[in-house]
Image: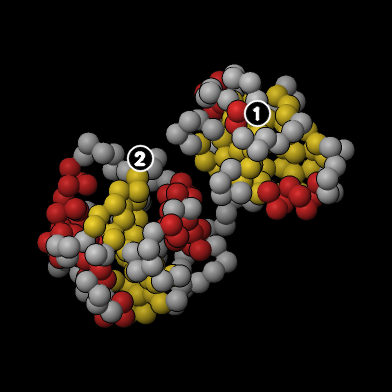
Amino acid sequence: MAIITLTTDWRNDDFYKGSVTGAILSGCNDARIVDITHQVSPFSSTQAAFILKNVFSHYPKGSVHILDVNSEASEQHKHIAFKYRDHYFVGTDNGSFGLLLIDDNPEEAVIIEKFVPDTCFTFPALYVFAPTAAYLASGKSLNELGSPLSGLNKQMPLLASINDSVIAGSVIYIDSYQNAITNISGELFEKIGKGRPFEILVQSYHYKINRINTTYNETSDGELLAIFNSVGLLEIAINRGNVAELLNIGLHSNVRVKFH
């Protein structure tokens, strides 16, 4: 049974999800459709890329992943399909896929031409992505969908800056528990820190953390903590609390690590 996933900014109560699900099943009636999320912030290609990057590899090889965020096509941003690590991806070449792969390249990529409607349309997930995903899930060849794509549009990821004693990072994602995930990796922390004592400064010098938890419960309820999460990134949280709301943390908020 083929698996087709959906990552979108539609919201669950909209008719878009039902329409696209029906179109997929019309093209491949034994497909299993999985909703990764429909809660991406509207038009947030970076958030969509972060979610899909950390999810897709947990699905079986051969799965097809539709990404429908900021998906209108243009001369610079074509509707595309590509193969990467034995998974298939369908969406718009608006930079999201470039962030997903970062320095890597797809094994094969095409500009979708087979399923482009003759008339103007404003719902590419229904008229382009759904039939494309069904086509791939049915075992059809990727290269029959259109002409080859030479390379993906790239966005530069937001990277932490470093010197000998400081890592200056920022928040790149707020999760369901209002925990703030940063762009500071465990690998970078160890490389710069070299086992030295440290302070993690959140937003300002007023909020300081000087230890890394291995579990959330090592810290008392309501207390601020830092932990390297399941994807290896430094996360700021409050045990059983909402750190983003309580400390007014949002995307791009500053988080600095100062080593002594």
Whether 118 is drawn above or below 11: the answer is below
Identify which residue is drawn at 18% across, 59% down.
24
Side of 162 relative to 94 (left or right): right
Residue beneath the point at 63% across and 42% down: 228
Residue 218 in percent (x, y) is at 65, 28
| 171 horizontally vs 1: left or right | right
Provide the secondary structure element on which disc 2 rests: loop
Q: Name the residue under label 2.
A: 39
Q: How far apart are marks 2 and 1 (CA)?
A: 31 Å
Q: Where is residue 179 in the image (x, y as percent from the top left)?
A: 54, 33
**Considering only vertical position in the picture, is 90 above or below 200?**
below
| Residue position marked by numbered label 1 in the rendering | 218
Left-right relation of 130 to 233 = left
Residue 206 percent across, percent down from the top left:
72, 21
Q: In which quarter of the image is residue 147?
A: bottom left
As helix, strand or loop, the secondary structure at mark 1 comes to helix
Image side of residue 170 versus residue 161, left or right: left
Mark 2 or mark 1, earlier in chain: 2
**Badge 2 amino acid:** Gln
Q: Can residue 75 be seen in this view?
A: no
In which quarter of the view is residue 65 placed? bottom left
Where does the C terminus fall, quadrant-wise? top right
Instruction: Identify the residue at image location x=63%, y=21%.
Output: 220
Which numbered circle lies on residue 186? none
Q: Check the picture and name the quadrant holding the N terminus.
A: bottom left
Inspect the image, locate mark 1, and give the three-letter code of the amino acid beneath it: Glu
